Image (cartoon, rainbow, N blue to C red):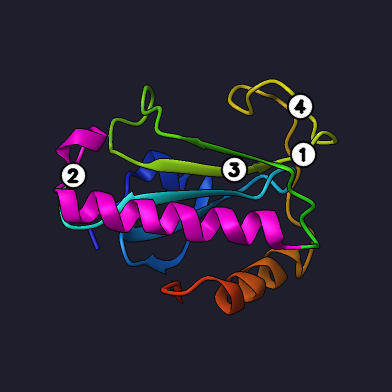
Amino acid sequence: MSHISDRLLSSAEHIGEMPSGALLLKDNAHYPWFMIVPGGGDFVEWIDLPAGLQEKMQADINSLSQFLLKDSVLGVGKMNVAAIGNIVPQFHLHIIGRNENDPAWPAPVWGHADSREYEKGEKEKLIERLVAAVPGFSMK
């Protein structure tokens, strides 16, 4: 695993590893919001990733998206997948589950001031379901 930017870790928890790199969970329970930080180098843009790593990341995006859309507890109806990187130049990819009842809907989640901490046990239950449903995910 490569170094993870302190800026990313200031608002997300490193919960484990995917085949393409580190998996982080954002500290905002309003949205099931994951980030993948690819391993194997200090990348800035998608085009900086070797082709094999891009393929692994695409497979990880698909696995996480399927989990988010199929998990009955989360109630996700729409996926947002983005690599913005304007504030944190280290390449990382956001995979966010959205629904029409979330506080930012239909606007982007970036810059939306409303945040909610995970309730006791809520994050752990989400991670348990993730472990059971997503092949290749391993807890850190």
**At x 64% / y 76%, what residue is drawn?**
128
- Determine which of the numbered discs, if any, sits on residue 96 in the image: 3
- Mark 1 — residue? 99
* Residue 114, image x, y percentages: 75, 30
The quadrant in which residue 56 appears is bottom left
Query: Disc 1 versus disc 4: distance between alpha carbons?
Result: 7 Å
- Determine which of the numbered discs, if any, sits on residue 76 in the image: none
Amino acid type of the residue tagged 3 in the rendering: Ile
Camera-nearest residue between 50 and 103 = 50
Q: Which residues are magenta?
A: 42-71
Query: Disc 4 versus disc 3: distance between alpha carbons?
Result: 12 Å
- Badge 4 crowding class, 10 Å Cα cut-off, few under 14, some 14 to 19, many 20 or more, is few
Q: What is the number of callouts on the image?
A: 4
- Determine which of the numbered discs, if any, sits on residue 49 in the image: 2
* Residue 70, image x, y percentages: 70, 61
The quadrant in which residue 121 appears is bottom right
Is disc 1 in contact with disc 4, using a CB cutoff of under 8 Å? yes
Amino acid type of the residue tagged 1 in the rendering: Asn
**At x 69% / y 20%, what residue is drawn?**
107
Mark 4 or mark 2: whose residue is earlier in sequence: 2
Q: Is residue 81 above or below residue 40?
A: above
Query: Disc 3 versus disc 1: distance between alpha carbons?
Result: 10 Å
